[in-house]
Amino acid sequence: MRADHGNGLDDQLTGIAFTKDNTVFCTTDTSGRIKKFDCTRITDWRTDQDIESKIKIPYFINAHRSLITSIEIIQKRTEEEILVDEKADNGSDDEDEEENEEFPIEAYVPWPDKFLLTASQDKNIFLHRLSNGVRIC
């Protein structure tokens, strides 16, 4: 699929990643760039009119020096998702649980942001903040 990035280059899309609630997605291209799309203003994809005007592009960054081969959005599970998974792993018996002194139960703390993890043919793996595209490492 051709990526229209307005630079005159004939870039191709190499990856796409969505948040769990499908309100934000990011694409990558053959020049090593990441483009974020914010779709939070769209309430219903089937009935909303003028969808293109409701999609915002908060950033379009040069993330790598070469083609991006992989992209993932990393976000923390909600407290409810964690509890459901723990019950499924341990069975539904709460009374069987013993407090482990070596690994005490920690309070749930939400993450300050979601993250993008990308790998490229430039042999680098980078972590970016999803909110603003700033590279962390």
Image (cartoon, helix red, strand yellow):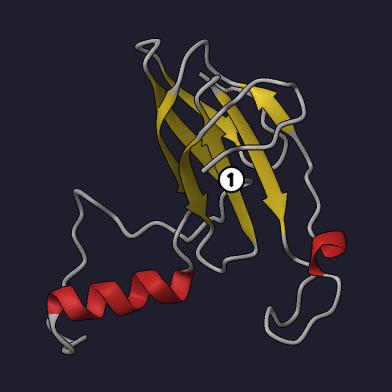
Q: Position of 48 compared to 97: left or right?
A: right
Q: Is residue 123 above or below residue 129?
A: above
Nearer-the-camera pick, 101 or 41: 41
x then y, percent, for residue 135: 60, 22
Q: Would residue 97 be visible to someone looking at this image?
A: no
Q: Position of 44 compared to 125: left or right?
A: right
Identify the residue under disc 1.
26
Q: Is residue 99 above or below residue 111?
A: below
Residue in view at x 47 percent, y 14 percent: 66
Residue in view at x 40 percent, y 10 percent: 122
x then y, percent, for residue 27: 56, 42
Q: Which quadrant of the structure image shows residue 85?
A: bottom left
Residue in view at x 60 percent, y 25 percent: 10
Nearer-the-camera pick, 7 or 107: 7
Label 1 crowd bin: few (<14), some (14–19), many (20+), radius 10 Å: many
Q: Which quadrant of the structure image shows residue 39?
A: bottom right
Nearer-the-camera pick, 124 or 49: 49
Q: Would residue 136 be visible to someone looking at this image?
A: yes
Nearer-the-camera pick, 98 or 17: 17
x then y, percent, for residue 99: 21, 66
Q: Position of 131 compared to 14: left or right?
A: right
Q: Is residue 92 above or below residue 106?
A: below
Tag 1, which secondary structure?
strand
**Amino acid type assigned to the residue bearing label 1 in the image:** Cys
